[in-house]
Image (tube, rainbow, N blue to C red):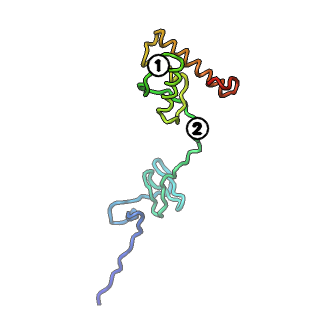
Amino acid sequence: MARKTKKRRRKTFYGHKLIPVGSDEKKPRIKTFDEPGRGRKLCKNCGKYVGLRTKICLCCWSFEKKKVVSMIKPPKDVTMTPAGAPPVKLKKTTKKAIRQWMIDVHGHFGGKMKFSATAYKYYVRYFFEYDSEKYKKCVRMINAIEKEKQSFVSGSKGENL
């Protein structure tokens, strides 16, 4: 009478066979150690030590890293100093034209970004030389407009804008 042999089922984890060290089969081989050492980490489930790059222990414990959720919230208002050429051309150096230009630049970005006076001054450098009188005049106008805006927001001037 022929003897029936039973096939041993091996444990699988994510499609990989878990093969003990003493087995005849090759790859993937997971070595376990009883004592700590360099390049080893402790399995919290079975108490054995495995290699640092091992992702799954023989006892099916997963060493996958958990995702860390950031507790830092981004600021609501972002002050931005732009890089590159201005999106809108400055046509005149009058106070009214500069104010309209500032509104157009702010509107170009959908009103989502808050520009400081420094950002507008940076953009003016694309139209006039840094040491020219027109540049200095535009800077004075931008500073004046920013002061008016701040005083309007604080409520001291009221309806002048």
Q: Residue at x 48, y 58 (%)?
A: 62
Amino acid type, residue under disc 1 in the picture: Val
In this image, 149 relative to 80: left or right? right
Q: Residue furthest bottom?
A: 1
Residue tagged by mark 1?
124
In this view, 140 is above or below 43 = above
Q: Residue at x 57, y 18 (%)?
A: 143
Q: Dot 2: what SS? A: loop
Residue tagged by mark 2?
76
Q: Residue 118 at x, y = what percent? A: 53, 22
In this image, 112 relative to 160: left or right? left
Q: Quadrant of residue 90?
A: top left
Q: Nearer the viewer, mark 1 or mark 2?
A: 1
Q: Residue 30 at x, y = what percent? A: 41, 59
Q: CA distance from mark 1 to mark 2?
A: 27 Å
Q: Residue at x 51, y 12 (%)?
A: 136
Label 1 crowd bin: few (<14), some (14–19), many (20+), radius 10 Å: many
Would you say the residues marked 1 and 2 are in contact, meaning their CB atoms lie under 8 Å apart? no
Q: Quadrant of the N terminus?
A: bottom left
Q: Quadrant of the C terminus?
A: top right
In this view, 69 is above or below 74 = below
User: Earlier along the polypeptide chain: callout 1 or callout 2?
Assistant: 2
Q: Nearer the viewer, residue 5 or 134?
A: 134
Q: Residue 32 at x, y = what percent? A: 45, 58
